[in-house]
Amino acid sequence: PNPQPPTPASVSALTADEVADKVQATYQGFSDLQGSFLQRATNKLSGMTQEASGRLYLKWPGRMRWEYEKPESRLFLIDGKTLWSYSPSERQAMAQDVSGALTTSPIGILFGMSGLRRNFRVRPIVHAGTRDSPDWLLELTPKGKEMSFKRVILGVDRESFLIRRLTVFDLYGNTTTVELSRQKVNNDLKDELFQFSPPPGTEVITPLKPIVP
């Protein structure tokens, strides 16, 4: 049988903290990123799981566009200060202030704005099912109480240090897993992609309190 090529010592010997540092440094070197996503959200009480998929666009600093294609068309967009949630079928848009809140949310990890080791306890997840995994598996537990979630598990590509899977456990025991694929970086995405103007006839709702995505 043909032997498998050895993993470079510099990679195989990385600690969880070193992987976290490389993830943050990798994302801080990007100007933008785009890809496809598959999202599964499981409610703890009902046990039901909802699945959605679409396209994701990120642009640094702090801009994001999630285009949901299935099961229905929806848009979530952050222009740097405001989160827009738009449902074409309901002809309704919600605008909420998120300025300064990204660093306390899971989205902040994707943007590389959160100091992973400064804000989280990082530990590796290693068991029989993960030893031959193409991903590093890291569990991040917030050190402070200002975070909007209990913990996050990251699946990190061993070569590119891109996040390929992100599972968020919220404060109520619900979980949301996002799998990212076909990721491309530094695409010179236009600023207009991260701007939103409600179409004519759209009801716009503006809550009083800021939220964390």
Image (cartoon, rainbow, N blue to C red):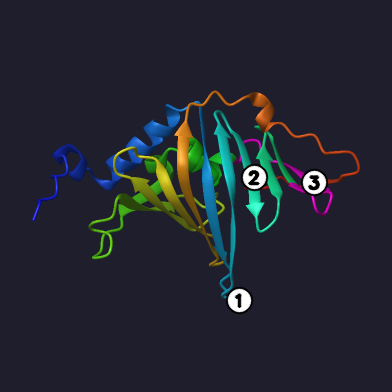
x and y percentages locating residue 16 in the rendered image? 28, 47
Please give the name of the residue rendered at 46% of the width and 28% of the height, measured from the top-left corner.
30
Residue position marked by numbered label 1 in the rendering: 46
Residue position marked by numbered label 3 in the rendering: 93
Q: CA distance from mark 2 to mark 3?
A: 14 Å
Q: Is residue 16 visible?
A: yes
Comes first in the chain, label 2 or label 1: 1
Comes first in the chain, label 3 or label 1: 1
- In what element is the residue under mark 3? strand
Q: How many marks?
A: 3
User: In the displayed structure, does residue 122 sit left or right of residue 106?
Assistant: left
Q: Which amino acid type is shown beneath numbered disc 3?
A: Ala
Q: Residues within 10 Å of mark 2 (few under 14, many from 20)?
A: many
User: In the displayed structure, does residue 78 sit left or right of residue 60?
Assistant: right
Name which quarter of the figure residue 72 lies in: bottom right
Q: Is residue 171 visible?
A: no
The residues colored magenta run 86-101
